[in-house]
């Protein structure tokens, strides 16, 4: 008796990022294009991200709100054998952090400049007194 359903291994998913971090409106590349089927069958893709579905092997997506999001990629071969991989995306608003760092740099640069101006002024005053 020949087996009607010969062994058909599930596709191999190349995307392995369990957790991703991004800032608001930053485009994230989700790339599973190196995925393959061990028996060389054609494969199809279904990404589920932020309540939406995408069917390309490689997509870009930008989140508009902060939070932790669930995502998944499912790869299916011609015989219906599939494999799924779940992941998380942490989206933060780094705008405030960038502004704070920028202001600290400006303050430090100002303080350093004032120090050198003061030293230069003291040297000039000292030479003028001679």
Image (cartoon, helix red, strand yellow):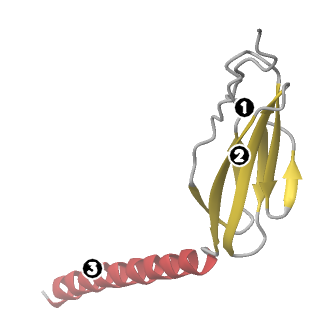
Disc 2 and disc 1 in contact, CB within 8 angstroms: no
Q: CA distance from mark 1 to mark 3?
A: 61 Å
Q: Residue at x 70, y 25 (%)?
A: 36
Find residue 33 and name its label. 1
Q: CA distance from mark 2 to mark 1?
A: 9 Å
Q: CA distance from mark 3 to mark 2?
A: 55 Å
Q: Position of residue 82 (x, y in %)?
A: 75, 36
Which secondary structure lies at badge 2?
A: strand
Q: How many marks?
A: 3
* Left or right: 122 in relation to 62: left
Which secondary structure lies at badge 1?
A: loop
Give the residue at mark 2.
30
In this view, the residue in front, 8 or 127, is 8
**88 relative to 8, above or below:** below
Q: Residue at x 60, y 73 (%)?
A: 94
Instruction: Give the quarter of the image for residue 24.
Output: bottom right
Which secondary structure lies at badge 3?
A: helix
Find residue 120 and name its label. 3
Q: Position of residue 17 (x, y in %)?
A: 57, 49
In this view, the residue in front, 23 or 36, is 36
């Amino acid at each position: 008796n020949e087996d009607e359903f010969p062994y058909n291994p599930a596709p191999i998913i190349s995307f392995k990022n369990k957790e991703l971090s991004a800032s608001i409106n930053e485009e994230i590349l989700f790339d599973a294009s190196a995925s393959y089927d061990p028996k060389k069958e054609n494969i199809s893709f279904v990404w589920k991200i932020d309540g939406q579905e995408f069917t390309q092997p490689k997509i870009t997506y930008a989140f508009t709100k902060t939070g932790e999001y669930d995502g998944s990629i499912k790869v299916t071969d011609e015989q219906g054998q599939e494999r799924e991989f779940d992941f998380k995306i942490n989206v933060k608003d780094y705008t405030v952090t960038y502004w704070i760092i920028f202001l600290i740099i400006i303050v430090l640069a100002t303080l350093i400049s004032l120090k050198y101006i003061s030293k230069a002024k003291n040297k000039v005053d000292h030479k003028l007194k001679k």
